Amino acid sequence: MPAIPGIGLFLVGWTVMIAAMMLPSSLTTLKLIDRTPIAERNRPSRFMVGYFVAWGVFGLAAFVGDVVLHMSVAVTPWLAERPSLIVGGVAMLGGVTELAGRPSPPRYPLVRPDSGSIAIGSAHAFDRIRRWPLMLFAMAVGMSSPVWMIALTLLMTLELGPQAEIVLRLAGLALFALGAAVVIEPSWLPVFFVAH
């Protein structure tokens, strides 16, 4: 497929996936924006613009990385014959992220308190994007598997819960184990993940 239609189709799919997976976990922030007294600057619709633009930029960067990865695989027959190494490796990386626990809050304020909703939306997205290994896993399998999309949505919604640390670490361990399983036994790839 030519580059421009390919990027366009990817961005449509990416936006749908972000809306399905990430937006539910951001509803609390969206409600706070809706209640702010500066209604003309802090409308939820403006928050959404900033939110989706930030995710779109990250998605494009991940897309370019994916293209480079596919080009590398195309010229490396050994790697092309072992897709389980790539999918399993991404799953293991996402699992390690969850095992490591939540990232620390940013050391600097992402936006000033009186910033508009677009800036607040993009800052909120950036705060979530700091979990990028899990998002790369979502890109690798979530866009082609409704089961994984639902599971990852639940996991990312749990990330904001105050008492979810143990559950998140267990989920990370499970994801790491699944990734390791398909690296060790490639025939399990279609069982656990949708093979590309």
Image (cartoon, rainbow, N blue to C red):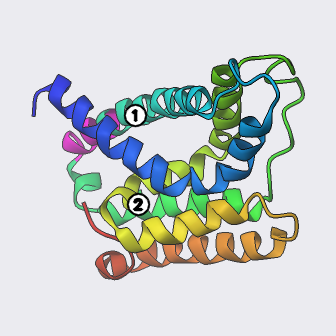
- Looking at the rendered structure, the kind of residue marked 2 is Gly
Quote the CA–CA distance across marks 2 and 1: 17 Å
Give the side of residue 163 with respect to residue 154, left or right: right
The label shown at residue 46 is none
* Image coords of residue 24 (percent x, y): 59, 56
Q: Is residue 54 magenta?
A: no
Magenta span main SS? helix
> Which residue is depicted at the point 59% across and 44% down?
132
Q: Residues within 10 Å of mark 1 (few under 14, many from 20)?
A: few
> Which residue is depicted at the point 35% across and 56% down?
143
> Which residue is depicted at the point 68% across and 20% down?
119
Q: Which of the 4 image quadrants contains residue 185?
A: bottom left
The residue tagged 1 is: 65
Q: Which residues are magenta?
A: 68-76
Q: Secondary structure at mark 1?
A: helix
* Image coords of residue 112 (percent x, y): 85, 17
Lower position in the chain sequence, tag 2 or tag 1: 1
Farthest left residue in view: 1
Q: Is residue 72 magenta?
A: yes
* Image coords of residue 12 (percent x, y): 30, 39
In the picture, the quarter occupied by the C terminus is: bottom left
- Looking at the rendered structure, the kind of residue marked 1 is Gly
The label shown at residue 142 is 2
The one nearer the camera, 182 or 149, is: 149
The one nearer the camera, 173 or 79, is: 173
Q: Secondary structure at mark 2?
A: helix
- Nearest to the eye among marks 2 and 1: give it: 2
Are the residues flagged by discs 2 and 1 in contact, CB closer than 8 Å?
A: no
> Which residue is depicted at the point 63% across and 40% down?
129
Q: Which of the 4 image quadrants contains residue 104?
A: top right
- Measured along the vertical axis of the image, is residue 99 above or below residue 46? below
